[in-house]
Amino acid sequence: MTRSPTRRALAAFAAATMALSLLAAAPPGRAPEGPPGQRADVGPCDPIDDGACLLPFPNDRFTTPADTPTGLRVDLPVQGMPVNARGVPVDPTEWNRNDGFSPGAMAIADVPGLDLQATFGLPAGVQVLDRPARSLAPDAPIVLLDLDTGARVPYLAELDHHPGAVAAGRQLLLIRPLEVLHGGHRYAVALRDLKDADGRTIPAEPVFAWYRGDRAGGPPPGVEPARTAEFNRLFRDLRKAGVGQRDLYLAWSFTVASDENVTGRAVHLRDEAFASLGDTDLADGVVDGEAPSFTVGPVLDAPNATTQRRVSGTVLVPNYLHAPALPPAGPDGGVSLEALLFATDARFDYGVADPGPMALPQRNQTAPWLSVPYVCNLPAAASAHDPADPMLYGHGLLGNRTQANGFSTELLRARNLAPCGVDFAGMSQFDQPNVVQILQDLSRFGPMPDRIQQGFLNFVFVGRALSHPDGLASHPAFQDASGAPLIDVDTLSYTGISQGGILGGPVVALSPDATNGVLGVPGINYSTLLNRSVDWEGAAVGNLYYASYPDVVDRQLGYALMQMLWDRGEGNGFARRTTTNPLPNSPPNNVLLHVAFGDYQVANMAAEVQARAYGARLLQTSLADGRHWSDDPAFRLSVFDRAADGSIAPHAGSAIVYFDSGNDAPPSVNLPPGDAGGDPHSDPRRDARGTDQRATFLREGVVVDTFDGEPYWTQFCRGPVNPNCP
């Protein structure tokens, strides 16, 4: 397959013309006013990949010098941004406040005719994910290199298998890091000796070939001589890593956003809010200052067999969200969180019209308080002599706090843990109107991570109300008839399921009080998860996105762009700062990942990326031999130690444990599982021995092998390989 050398230029011109012609019709405040400040000596697009203006991506070609920790800020041109079905290009303004690219999103290139099996020397049907060590081989045809350290990074290379891409004949090359990249580091992507299905080497495109040294006949159209020094530097860096430039099909570099740029807003919100309580040292593990203000009511006695009392109420949390029209304050003095999320375009305000990359949100002075609802379930077993251990609970996809009342926490309540649900602002039931608007116009994506970061603050403030002796435990609703507390203020933890597992990592990372967390069926990042999830593929949200962005290249670029902002409000951006390398002014934490093998909703490979970032150990016996899709199930993960008698020793620290209901292994490409066994997504939380493990970890931060060295087969018969099935 060949492409016209003028197709990219024509597409870029058409996109620019369309953008200018549609400005008047774009939604107020959303239409880009024109391209951001590009260097005068170059055009808006990168001509080294003829597939689309922004390819290859991410790419330091789309940055400009700035006063930031990386020395850069992103500078995406409007001409290259995805265009929706109404002809409106994504406004790059919010993206151009990043000082680099995502630490986890895929690298994208267009390589017509590429065959990965022939390129990697793999048998038919075997994918790069099935042989992960192949990505680190000295002769690997794709190299992902940390230019700051010289270390090679493992990856999954795949062609876009989404049916729309296959039907359109535009299967982009997607290179997904199997480890979260380091904030502020510069990385190179090198493609060499790429093969087509007949085993023939695919020649480099003319512009890149010229930079590489093929100078016969003079520079082809699109060459920017001023970039020669940039490429020469890149080629020198690659040669040091054993990658020669003559064999390159394509190479480029990109800088990952700094930790300060990704997590700094959330840390600022938390530190300023806790300082208002009188607690400025959040790393010392001491509850200091005042308790947050709260209300209680209603109270429901004995709602079910495992709960003696269900208590609802609100906690007042400093409000950093702004909107043109705010709901009125309620009786407790705070604006209703639900009303603010549901009815407004609430997002951060920075006090200036054009905030820079390192600007921090300002508290809303008109509405300084949010009234954040909670619901707590006091277990039937809780007593003055054996108070329950309070536990923050994070709900599933676009749900709400009342999921803490249901089966997801039933077995934990039976073990005397008291789950307290809070709405995940930004991705709750009350954010659904905002989500619908985002999927039709990605220019509107910015408010989502703003709201999620406010949601993180809401969680940790409710956590402080549970941990402070003058907080919820001081109220009669949380006490027995004698006035003794029914919750132990010294034992707060966190559990989240699905979305609550994906977003829960940052809650644990930011909480000064909940230092042990169990993340149920989790994974990072969303740009990896969406194509691999039945919650997206074939579901209303995915269908709306595909209708809004019909071009298959724009869709994948859209995922990568969303991830750059999502990092501020999901586990990916916080992953390397969650456990032993905590955020500033934060204690270290322990995290246990409970993973459903073959999960239909959250891809297993994404949970393993999360585990590597946490330094988690794999409980190596939790999957039976041969069940994992890879030839190396413990790739880049340490495993549990063994005791003197050969048994699995308890592990104090972070870990990943699989639960197996007998499903087929998940696909090794970007498609959701399709076996007939049924979704195992809910099985780990319903497993009694798994719950014993969860409860011990939440209280002690220690993982005990509750299956005594045997594979973690569940009692749910989803496939014939499960020995529990008849």
Image: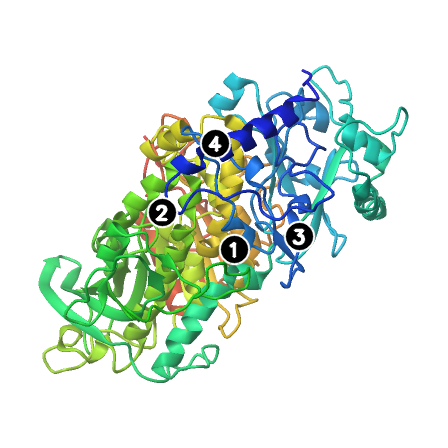
Secondary structure at badge 2 equals: helix
Which element is circle 1 on?
helix
Mark 1 or mark 2, which has the lower sequence index?
Answer: 1
Task: Give residue 323's position: percent from left, percent from top.
Answer: 31, 57
Q: Which residue is drawn at 40% across and 62% down?
A: 349
Is residue 600 in view from this perspective?
no
> Could you give the CA–CA distance between mark 3 and mark 2, rounded to whole angstroms?
47 Å
Reply above or below: 672 against 4: below
Label 1, on which residue?
573
Characterize the local packing of mark 4: few (<14), some (14-19) or many (20 or more) Cα atoms within 10 angstroms: few
In 3D space, how far apart are the residues under numbered discs 2 and 4 (Cα atoms)? 53 Å
Q: Compared with residue 628, is residue 640 higher up or lower down, i.e. above or below? A: below
Color theme of the render: rainbow
The amino acid on which the numbered mark 4 sits, given as a three-letter code, is Ser
Q: Which mark is residue 21?
A: 4
Pointer 2: what residue? 684
Q: To which residue does mark 3 refer?
A: 64
Real-space Cα distance between discs 4 and 3?
27 Å
Distance between the alpha carbons at the discs numbered 1 and 4: 37 Å
Labels 3 and 1: the sequence-earlier one: 3
Q: Left or right: where does residue 154 sit relative to residue 323?
A: right
- Which residue corresponds to the image point at 48% horizontal and 36% vertical from the top-left? 89
Q: Quadrant of the N terminus?
A: top right
Name the foreground residue: 703 vs 19.
19
